[in-house]
Every structure is written in C-alpha cells, then in structure tokens.
Amino acid sequence: MRAARLITYRQPLEVTTIPDPAPAQDGVVVRVLACGVCRSDWHAWSGSDPDVILPMTPGHEYCGEVASVGARVTRWRVGDRVIAPFILACGRCPDCAQGHQTICADQLVPGFTCDGAFAEYVAVAHADANLTSLPDSIAPDIAAALGCRVTTAWQALVGRAQVQGGEWIAVFGGGGVGISTLLLGKALGARVVIVDITDDKLNYAKALGADAVVNAATCDAPQAVKDITGGGAHVAIEALGVEATTVSAMRSLRKMGRMVQIGMPAGDHTQMALPMDVLYSGQLSVFGTRGMPSWRYPSLLSLIAGGGIDLSPLVTRKISLNQVSAELAAFDHPTPPGVAVVTDFVS
Ligand SMILES: [Zn+2]
Ligand SMILES: [Zn+2]
C-alpha cells in the first residue's frame, strides 16, 4: 500500500510503498477514506512528542471501510463504514470498564505509538471496544475532521466543563479545535468568543457565528473577554498548549469559572508559570482533557447527522498524501483557517 512515512524529524514525509497491515485477532484493518492533518501530527513531525519512535506513519484522524477482520472480532464485518477515536483503548481494564477509555493504561495511539492513517490502510486494535458505525449521511472528510479536534472539543465541553446553555465560552486559539469548539458550543446554546492573533481566523470565526472575536496581538485579551462577557467567561478553552494562552485563558474567567486545557503542552511548554493567585481568589477549576471515549460518538454523530450542527466549514482543504508534508511544515507559523484532510491516497 502507499503510505506517507516520517523517517527524519522536520523533513518531508516519504511517500512510499510498504506491506499492507494485517488485523490482530481482536482488530480490523480499515481502508482509509479520509484522514485529517492536525497540530498533534506536527508535534510528532517536529520531534516534540516523546512517544514517537521512527520510522512511523503519522495520521490519527481517520475514518474508512472495514477491509479485513480478526478472528475474535464480533461487531464488525468487511464493508462496514467506521470511525475510531485517536486513543485505542484496551476495552478490558478497570478504567475502560468505568467509561474512562481515554486514560486506559494499555492504549495505542495510531500515528504516535503505532502506524497511523496517512496510508491506504490502517490496522485498528481492539476493534469491538473502539469503533463506531459511521452514518452514510456523514461524508468521509467531515468524519475524519471529527477524529480528534471535534471529539476532543465535545469531550471538553460536555464531559469536562459541562457547559450550560447561555454560558460564555472563551476559546484561545482559532484553529481546528477553536472552530470545533465554536460550532459545538453554539449547538449547545452557549455564547462563544474566539481569541486569536490572525485576523483571517477571527473573520472566519465571526462568519461561522462567533458572538465576538478578540485579536490578542492588539489588546489585553483577558480584559477584552471580561468586557465582552460582562465579567469573564464561564468556561475558557485553551487550544494551543502554550503558556501565554493558558495564562490568558485563566485570566479571562469570571469567578468560579472553569478552564479546560485541550492544547498539548509539548517541548518548551511542558512547564508553565500560572497565576495561582487568580485561581485561588477566583475559585477556578482547571481540567485537563485528551481525546474522547468511544461511547460518546453516538451522541455527537446523531447531532451531526440530524442537522444540529454543520461541520462542513471546518474542512477547507482536501489534499493528497503528497501534500501532507507542506501542511505539517505550515504549523511552524500561524496557519490559514480551517483544516486539511487527506482524501486522495493514490495520486
Ligand atoms: Zn483499558
Ligand atoms: Zn488530532
């Protein structure tokens, strides 16, 4: 099969032919219909994710069609359209049994700890525990864009911060996670302010229904959020994993506010100096979050399939395997609005 392989950090992926994967006893192989390009792939590409051992096929936001099935799989047949969370949980441990698959100690993460989906086929471990049936009405490129950013945002809003209708959400970072949070937040009845440093992204967010936007390059962003929201956001979402935006997110909250750290602090940002006086006096809550357990897919997919949310504005670029490297390198700088999804695996 064709695959885009990461051989050397920060160098273009090598698009090459490698053997097709075979399913594990409890796994399947999926023919990839679409795979998103994400900032987490850039972490892997740039060598700042310690889990990655080279060579590796990146790509963790995928959907596709079951192509072959392991002997112990009971729920899936060849031809089924499926989507998988980027964290493949074991399905058997106490954390999985409690519904906390994202903290499973035996998890696999395609594109990071095993080969991912910038390829014609990807092996999916523990298929019965992880896959969800993908409705025909959801196009592959939209489903792939769900794989990490939308699902992570859904878990942050619903599972962690437990956002209520009418609350203000301040989103720091107007990229894929930011736009996902905007669309989901609006669908939940919240009001959303997007904070970024590029006018392109802010204009895009505004066009997609953001109640307000703030350019952090030209003002005191936390103060601007407080002015817009009448005292501070109820919920702040940090979508970059960067100290400056994490500090701003905390400072933008009203008292008793909740912050969710979605951005992965990597490289120089693993240690941050945070305003603990603000946390103390404001009696804030801070949540970490990573991924979404597979059991939350049906609620999200039915919201999308039922027309409760239109995710098509999220995907602004459909690309081929050969174009992934340029998208990865682009994360070194402020990126254009929307996300890129690989839909062409042969040319
Ligand atoms: Zn487990
Ligand atoms: Zn991702």
Image (cartoon, grey):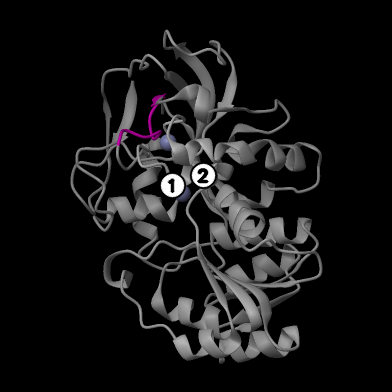
Q: Does residue 271 appear to the left or right of 313 in the view shown?
A: left
Q: Does residue 42 appear to the left or right of 142 in the view shown?
A: left
Magenta-colored stretch includes residue 315:
no
Question: Of residues 149 and 7, which is closer to you in this image?
Answer: 149
Find disc 2 in the rendering and name its residue: 100
For the point 68% across and 48% down, which residue is it?
Answer: 311
Judged from the image, the secondary structure of the residue bearing numbered disc 1 is helix
Magenta: main secondary structure: loop
Q: Which residues are magenta?
A: 114-123
Q: Does residue 252 appear to the left or right of 302 in the view shown?
A: left
Q: Say whether residue 36 is visible.
A: no
Q: Amino acid at mark 1?
A: Ile
Q: Amino acid at mark 2?
A: His
For the point 42% across and 83% down, which residue is it?
Answer: 274
How far across and down, in percent of the image, does residue 42 sit?
Answer: 35, 54
How far across and down, in percent of the image, does residue 206 sit?
Answer: 71, 69
Above or below — where is 132 with respect to 209?
Answer: above
